Image: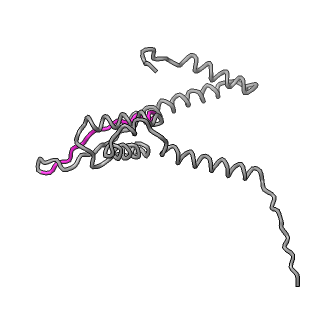
Amino acid sequence: MNFKLRSRSIPLNPFLVILVLVMAISISDLNASDSTFRYHYQLLGKEDQQLYKRIQDCVKLCGDTLQDVPDSFAQIDHIFDYVLLDNPRFFYCLPSYTLVTNTRNDIPYRHDMTFSYEKIEKKNERTRNVVDSILTILQSIDDPRSDYDIVKGVYEYLGRNCLYDEAYPD
């Protein structure tokens, strides 16, 4: 008996191939963004780099507390500024922190950083208000003839209601 092997090609769906490639690229970008070269990180010593990573991870996940940090406010503030400079994506949350000293019998035994993200909620509330007012305007447009009329209404609203802080440097 002779067996003959036949090769069979399976047709590939181009959509699936593109989807897999996009997912692979975005996953590699996500992993690369955490391991990319950070200028300010490089300037720190080994111990400060460890604290840098801990602060970065805590802010990235919007964590509330980072335990066991050094008691030097100047050192923590310096490293915290470096984290924000190396990670501009964190500026959206405008994190602030407080150095908390835990004591037992008036003897400090641990220093913690507590983070506050109050500004996020304020910005989200303002954003929701603007979106609601834009939706109200869009609903008030009588029989929009095209998408152009809708976009024009949004731009007119923004032009009338946006205020610019000229004293702000950015």
* Above or below: residue 95 compared with residue 1: above
Q: Is residue 134 left or right of residue 55?
A: right
Q: Which secondary structure class fits the magenta region best?
A: strand
Q: Which residues are magenta?
A: 90-104
* Above or below: residue 16 compared with residue 48: below
Q: Please name the residue shown 25% across and 44% down the image.
A: 70
Q: Is residue 93 magenta?
A: yes
Q: Is residue 14 left or right of residue 160?
A: right
Q: Is residue 140 magenta?
A: no
* Above or below: residue 145 compared with residue 92: above
Taking depth in this image into account, of 153 and 5 the one nearest to the observer is 5
Q: Please name the residue shown 32% across and 38% down the image.
A: 97
Residue 87, horizontal then vertical, whole percent: 45, 37
Residue 119, horizontal then vertical, whole percent: 40, 33
Residue 74, horizontal then vertical, whole percent: 26, 34
Residue 61, horizontal then vertical, whole percent: 43, 46
* Above or below: residue 43 compared with residue 15: above
Taking depth in this image into account, of 37 and 125 the one nearest to the observer is 37
Q: Please name the residue shown 55% across and 31% down the image.
A: 132
Q: Please name the residue shown 65% across and 22% down the image.
A: 153
Tally of numbered tags: 0
